[in-house]
Image (spheres, grey):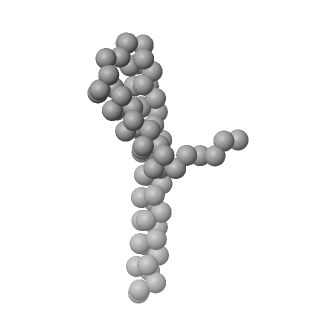
Amino acid sequence: MPKEKSFEELFTRLEEIVQEMESEDLQLEKSLKLFEEGVKLSELLKSQLSGAEQKITELMSKMESSDK
């Protein structure tokens, strides 16, 4: 089972896709493949960010509870 890529690795790949799509005269098929990969990466990044946000919320809640 492959290791899940880090947020930074996913974000770097997304940046590469954006640069490639902006800077090159791509064939339609290549553009669509890159776009599809970019959408999938965006979904993974959003999921990871949501998970991080939830952890932060839980930690802040625990800190507030322990302060009382």
For the N terminus, which image quadrant? top right
Q: Please tell me whether residue 47 is drawn above or below residue 22 in the rendered image.
A: below
> x, y percentage for residue 15?
37, 39
Q: Nearer the viewer, residue 63 or 14?
A: 14
Vertical placement of 11 versus 28: above or below? below
Q: Residue at x 37, y 12 (%)?
A: 28
Residue that sits furthest to the bottom in the current view: 68
Quadrant where the C terminus sits is bottom left
In this rendering, the count of numbered labels is 0
Q: Residue at x 45, y 50 (%)?
A: 8
- Which residue occupies the foreground of this view, 42 or 60? 42
Which residue sits at x=48%, y=46%?
Answer: 9
The structure residue drawn at horizontal position 40% and vertical position 79%, both measured from the top left corner, is 64
Using the rendered image of the protein, determine whether residue 43 is visible from the camera's viewpoint.
Answer: no
Look at the picture and state if 6 lies above or below 23: below
The outermost residue toward the top is 28
Furthest toward the right, the residue is: 1
Q: On screen, 35 above or below 30?
A: below
Most extreme residue toward the front, as rendered?
A: 24
Location of residue 35 in the rendering, given as x and y in whole percent from the top left corner: 39, 25
Provide residue 36's location: percent of width, then percent of height: 44, 25
Whether residue 60 appears in this view of the structure is yes
